[in-house]
Image (cartoon, grey):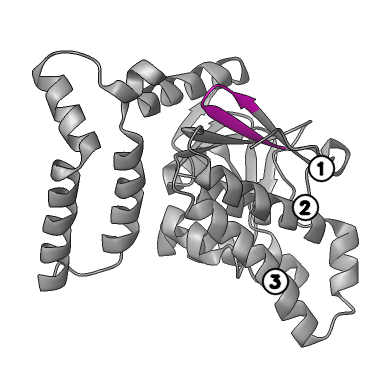
């Protein structure tokens, strides 16, 4: 896809890496229905773009994302229940598009990530944060709940941590976010880009079809007991991978001590 010309969401392509930049710095990258719709479109298109191997999600300016735009929240306060449900479905579908994107995704976090911003981080496969980043699930302070982001944040942080941070709405640090499982790496700001580049290098070493299939595997087995269905399903999945062209190329390259074709393209 071409670089996005949307004012509030920019897509920057550098080779096989696409950066989705939240570009409302003056509003701390808070989002409204228009930004949500554009993010949904961008995530969906990047997911099907064969030239993209990895997607970075960043925020412009001093914040990653402050969550919901105050003007948008003001409009929502006068909505009927049905209007609120329709509006919430837009956010839910955007989060789904990011969470299930068939490409590796990395949240690159600096500054505050609040409310829906935490949801964006949780939907990414990997998250790297500066040591000064802060997080907050602030919804209960407004008499609301972190509903549409809930499945992804609970999956990332676990029920026990969410029972604290959903209910207290307290701010927590990058190190606390790492301990809770929300982010994988916490580094000084000067090391942020280098850390991301290291992750991208590792991603480019893997087969793109295998990475897509690996994500599908996680979603398929993550919440299921290891029953007869799962045993047969996982055997089918590895059989498909072994018999597929990418699997044969990868194993052949390993045995022949050469780089597989997807690394030569990168």
Q: Mark 2 points at which residue?
A: 35
> Tag on residue 8?
1
- The answer, for residue 130, to whether it is visible in the render is no
- Closer to the chain start, of discs 3 and 2, is 2
- The answer, for residue 162, to whether it is visible in the render is yes
Task: State whether residue 107 is above or below residue 161.
Answer: above
- Closer to the chain start, of discs 1 and 3, is 1
Q: In this view, does 232 lie to the left or right of 93?
A: left
Q: Position of residue 138 (x, y in %)?
A: 69, 59
Residue at image x 59%, y 31%? 18
Q: Magenta span has 18?
A: yes
Q: What stretch is highlighted in magenta?
A: 13-21
Residue at image x 62%, y 32%? 19
Q: In which quarter of the image is the C terminus?
A: top left
> On the image, which quarter does residue 247 sit in?
top left
Q: Nearer the viewer, residue 243 or 60?
A: 243
**Element under label 3?**
helix
Determine the CA span between mark 1 and mark 2. 7 Å
**Element under label 1?**
loop
> On the image, which quarter does residue 167 sit in?
bottom right
Residue at image x 39%, y 19%? 265
Q: Where is residue 255 in the image (x, y as percent from the top left)?
A: 8, 20
Q: Is residue 102 left or right of residue 61?
A: left
Q: Mark 3 points at which residue?
A: 88
Q: Where is residue 55 in the image (x, y as percent from the top left)?
A: 54, 36
Q: Which of 17 and 70 is in front in this view?
A: 17
Q: Which of marks 3 and 2 is in front?
A: 2
Q: Where is residue 144 in the image (x, y as percent from the top left)?
A: 71, 72
Disc 1 to disc 2: CB gap under 8 Å: yes
Binning the other alpha carbons within 10 Å of mark 2 as few (below 14), some (14 to 19) or many (20 upward) gives: many
């Amino acid at each position: 896809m071409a670089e996005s010309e949307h004012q509030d969401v920019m897509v920057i392509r550098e080779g096989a890496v696409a950066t989705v930049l939240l570009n409302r710095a003056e509003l701390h990258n808070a989002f409204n229905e228009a930004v949500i719709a554009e993010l949904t479109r961008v995530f969906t298109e990047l997911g099907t773009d064969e030239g993209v191997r990895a997607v970075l999600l960043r925020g412009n300016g001093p914040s990653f994302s402050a969550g919901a735009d105050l003007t948008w929240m003001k409009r929502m306060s006068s909505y009927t229940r049905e209007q609120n449900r329709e509006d919430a479905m837009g956010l839910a579908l955007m989060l789904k598009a990011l969470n299930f994107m068939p490409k590796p995704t990395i949240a690159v976090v600096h500054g505050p990530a609040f409310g829906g911003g935490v949801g964006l981080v949780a939907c990414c496969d990997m998250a790297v944060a500066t040591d000064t980043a802060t997080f907050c699930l602030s919804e209960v302070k407004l008499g609301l709940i972190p509903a549409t982001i809930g499945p992804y944040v609970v999956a990332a942080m676990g029920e026990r941590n969410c029972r604290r941070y959903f209910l207290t709405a307290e701010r927590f640090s990058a190190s606390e976010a790492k301990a809770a499982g929300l982010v994988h790496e916490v580094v000084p700001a000067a090391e942020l880009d280098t850390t991301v580049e290291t992750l991208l290098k590792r991603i480019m070493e893997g087969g793109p079809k295998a990475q897509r299939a690996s994500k599908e595997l996680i979603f398929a087995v993550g919440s299921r007991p290891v029953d007869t269905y799962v045993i047969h399903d996982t055997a089918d999945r590895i059989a498909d991978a072994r018999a597929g062209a990418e699997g044969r190329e990868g194993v052949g390259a390993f045995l022949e001590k050469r780089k597989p074709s997807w690394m030569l393209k990168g």
